[in-house]
Amino acid sequence: MELHIPSVMGFEKVAMECAASTAKKMGFTEDRVEDLKTAVAEACLNAIEHGNKMDTSTKVGITLTIEESKLQVVVKDEGKGIKEIPNPSIEHKMEGKEKPRGWGIFLIKNLVNEVIFEPSPEGGNLVRMIIYLDK
């Protein structure tokens, strides 16, 4: 399933609800659906703000792939791409050693089972999130 949203704050909710609806249909628990919603929203917001630089002429692509026991969500921006994804430290943020912003990557990593940040072959960045169905 593919979805393309404009790089406008608020449209991340469309992707979030699409992922949530899919996860519910697959039988995910309500807690896991909420985790997924937060991770998808954060990935989309990062794509809008940091990848596409809030350029309303660009889009964020979201692809949901349903497999037997997992759901994969890929969020792609049209930005220049970055070579290295920062690895935020909650301890450093709490101690003031890192900027207070940048919790999105931390949240994503802690809410889904697997996450891969990679450059897209077409340009921009991909965030590949996998969440497993625990029955």
Image (spheres, rainbow, N blue to C red):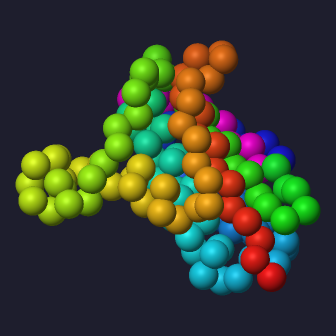
Q: Position of residue 86 (x, y in %)?
A: 35, 38
Residue 29 lies in quadrant:
bottom right
Residue at 84% over, 73% down: 25
Q: Picture coordinates of residue 66 (x, y %)?
A: 85, 56
Q: Residue 95, image x and y in percent? A: 9, 59
Q: Is residue 58 magenta?
A: yes
On screen, residue 79 versus residue 103, left or right, reads right
Instruction: Decide which of 58, 83 is in the foreground and name it.
Output: 83
Q: Residue at x 60, y 81 (%)?
A: 31
Residue bounds of the magenta highlight: 52-64
Residue 65 in the magenta stretch? The answer is: no
Q: Work out whether 77 lies above or below 11.
A: above
Above-or-below relation of 9 to 133: above
- The residue at 59%/33% (across/down) is 126
Instruction: Say which of 73 and 91 sits in front.
Output: 91
Q: Is residue 110 left or right of residue 96?
A: right
